[in-house]
Amino acid sequence: MKLAVFDFDSTLVDAETLEALGEAYGVGTEIQACTTEAMEGRADFYTSLLSRVALLKGMDVRVARAVCEGLPLHKGAKEAIEGLRARGYKVVCFSGGFKLATAFFKEKLGLDADFSNTLHARAGVLEGLVSGPMMRGDSKREMLLGLQQLLRARHTVVVGDGANDICMFDLADVSVAFNAKEIVKERASAIARSLDLREVLDHLKA
C-alpha cells in the first residue's frame, strides 16, 4: 500500500478556510493575523485555532457552508490526485480546518478519506466552538502514523505548506513543500516551484 497525504488549506485549495469564513463574517483581518502566526510557527496551533473559531460565533451555518464549498482549488489538484491513484496510492487530506470544506472536496476530488475538525452549531448558527482530531500542532503526525500502521503503507508522500505539516515529514519517503512558508521549505525533501499540483507527480520516487 502506498499513501499520499495532502494538507487542505493553501495546498489543495488556494485559500485558508478560516480566513474565507472570517471575510464573509466581517472578522477577516483579525483571523488573518492569527493564521499567519500559526502557519509560520510563531504561535501555538491549538490556542490559535480556538481563538480564531471563537470569532465566528453567530455566523449562519448556511453562509459558512456556501463559503466552504466555494473555495477555489489549486491548479492541477484533480489531475494530481488521479495521477497518484493511478500509481496505486491511497490519497487523503489532513486539515486543521473543517468538515464543512473537506467533506465536500473529498467527494469532488475523489479522495479516499478526509480528516479535519467540526465547527459546533446550534439553531442554524455557529457557536464559536470546534472539536476534532486535528486541533494540535502534532495531530497530523499522530494521524499519519496511525494510518501507516493500519494500511501497512510501504511508501508515503506528504504535501503541505504550513508549520503544522512539518511534523509529518520524518514519517514520509517524500515530503513536498507546496505554496509553502520558508520554515516548511527548509524541512521538506522537495520544493514545488510552481502553483500547479501536478508538479507533485514529478517528485515521486520510481
Image (tube, grey):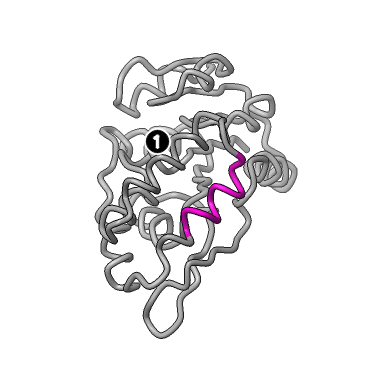
Is disc 1 placed on a helix, strand or loop? loop
The outermost residue toward the bottom is 123
Q: Nearer the viewer, residue 48 or 155?
A: 48
Q: Is residue 78 magenta?
A: no
The outermost residue toward the right is 149
Q: Locate residue 90, reporting x and y percent.
A: 53, 42
> Against 44, is 60 above or below?
below
Q: Locate residue 155, reporting x and y percent.
A: 63, 29
Q: Locate residue 185, reporting x and y percent.
A: 50, 17
Residue flagged by tag 1: what amino acid is it? Thr
Q: Nearer the viewer, residue 206 or 148?
A: 148
The outermost residue toward the front is 30
Left or right of 96 on screen, residue 79: left
In magenta, the rendered stretch is: 44-53
Q: Locate residue 75, reporting x and y percent.
A: 26, 33
Left or right of 82 on screen, residue 47: right
Residue carrying label 1? 11
The structure residue drawn at horizontal position 50% and vertical position 71%, both measured from the top left corner, is 120
Numbered-mark total: 1
Corner quadrant of residue 24: bottom left
Q: The N terminus is located in which quarter?
A: top right
The structure residue drawn at horizontal position 32% and vertical position 66%, both measured from the top left corner, is 65
- Circle 1 crowding by C-alpha within 10 Å: few under 14, some 14–19, many from 20: many
The structure residue drawn at horizontal position 53% and vertical position 36%, both measured from the top left corner, is 4
Corner quadrant of residue 193: top left
> Against 112, is 178 above or below?
above
Left or right of 52 on screen, residue 77: left
The structure residue drawn at horizontal position 64% and vertical position 47%, both measured from the top left corner, is 136
Question: Of helix, strand and loop, which mostly describes the magenta segment?
Answer: helix
Q: Nearer the viewer, residue 168 or 205?
A: 168
Q: Is residue 50 magenta?
A: yes
